Image (spheres, rainbow, N blue to C red):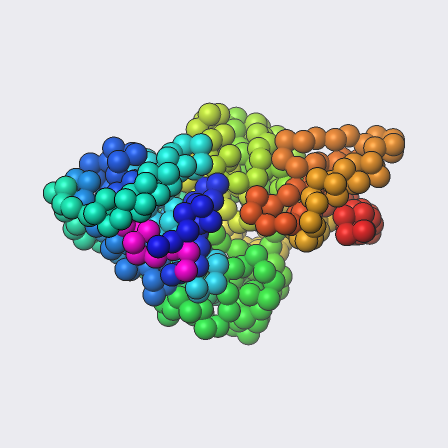
Amino acid sequence: MGDLARIFKAYDVRGVVPDEFDEETAEAVGAAFAEVTGARTAVVGRDMRASSEPLAAAFARGAASRGADVIDIGLASTDMLYYASGSLGLPGVMFTASHNPARYNGMKMCRAGAVPIGGDTGLTEIRDRAAELLAAGTGGIGGSGGGTVSRRDLLRGYADHLRTLVDLSGIRPLRVVVDAGNGMGGHTVPTVFDGLPLELTALYFELDGGFPNHEANPLEPENLRDLQKAVLDTGADIGLAFDGDADRCWVVDERGESVSPSAITALVAVRELAKRPGARIIHNLITSRSVPEIVAEHGGEPVRTRVGHSFIKAEMAGTGAVFGGEHSAHYYFRDFWSADTGMLAALHVLAALGEQDRPLSDLLAAYTRYAASGEINSTVADQAAAVERVRERFAARDGVTFDELDGLTVSGPGWWFNLRPSNTEPLLRLNAEAADEIQMAAIRDEVLAVVRS
């Protein structure tokens, strides 16, 4: 039996298989999901991990035992599951542990229309009901409620839908390297790119949940090295790296240089504003200050929010924003049920690059204005005390302001930093930005010295 208290997080379910998350647990969660959501039909997708297929099948049994029909779409990226939920108007569950190591698996859940289910919107109730079923024994989970399980292939529909949102038919031919990291990008990219004027060099497209080449986490620089080398070796115009469930996309330019997701957010925002002048654009509080500046300069209304997809999606729904971007390379589109899809962001970048003749580094120069530290983690036993020490250090300085929307944001003349505790680990996360590299490094190092003292 799994450990529900450990594996249910604020936004999803994630744990080590089978120690924390096993088939009995998945079956109980399936039954609880059907009961709590009242779903008469649900859609289920899975990534390439060895444990994903049996866990998804167990979930389907549990949901069917409560009378829910289950549509199994098989292998899918997480944004393909969102497409299924949105296009079919059904609640859905994706079995994936995203970029986590091979021994992990998990679930991302949504209501019809890809509306996320989080701790405040049903996930806690699903956890508690699953715990009751597990406590009652297998008899509490089993039985037949008459639900059925059927298969449906939605890969071509997903690809066709994305290509209705971004037109690449008229772009100049581009040489593209894609590193799928043995994750679900290897399943979706060939179909999405099929017939486009793209010369594709494929790295690690073989689906393998053991991740034999490198972790499928493009936020870690070492996981980009093969892609960067391949871009230079092939003379490619652009490199793209997807994480394990292919809902995030990281970009590398023609020089093999990593591109900040803030620059991608600004570029895509400008493209969306060209279609919808004056629209709202969401950015979280640790994206570059260049993002709200550029949005405002192009007539849009920037909306700042906390870090995390549940907050972004809530703001998207509440404000009617057309697009949102995060520092973590998650990109959200109103045209995609306000869900995140790295693939659609990648198509926007390819279109922007192919619609003009300059190299990607030149194109993106207009969207990169400041020096940023990236996210730096520090292991701290007493996070609150460390944050208070930082506040005291900067409190007496002229022109300094404090903001506690999410952690502590400190802003001064030409610089800012955010210090934010992890929700799940004894970590403090630092992001700093300044007008130039020297000023940024000075602020970064001063904050880290206080935090780690």
For the question of whether residue 123 can be seen, the reply is: yes
For this orientation, the residue located farthest to the front is: 136
Left or right: residue 313 compared with residue 92: right
Is 105 within the magenta? no
- The quarter holding residue 422 reads top right
Provide the major secondary structure of the magenta segment.
helix
Point out residue 38 in the picture as x, y percentages from the top left corner.
Answer: 25, 33
Q: Residue at x 50, y 46 (%)?
A: 330
Is 23 within the magenta? yes
Left or right: residue 322 compared with residue 394: left
- The quarter holding residue 1 reads bottom left
Point out residue 236 in the picture as x, y percentages from the top left corner.
Answer: 52, 66
Relative to 65, does residue 182 appear above or below in the rendering?
Answer: below
Q: Residue at x 42, y 69 (%)?
A: 210
Relative to 442, does residue 291 appear above or below in the rendering?
Answer: above
Point out residue 381 in the picture as x, y percentages from the top left corner.
Answer: 69, 49
Left or right: residue 365 compared with residue 27: right
Q: Pick the residue in front: 358 or 99.
A: 99
Point out residue 57 in the picture as x, y percentages from the top left corner.
Answer: 24, 55
Q: Residue at x 33, y 51 (%)?
A: 25
Left or right: residue 304 compared with residue 240: right
Query: What is the number of callouts on the image?
Result: 0
Q: Pick the residue in front: 272 or 186.
A: 186
Q: From which residue to which does the magenta span run?
A: 19-28
For the question of whether residue 342 can be seen, the reply is: no
Q: Residue at x 18, y 53 (%)?
A: 151
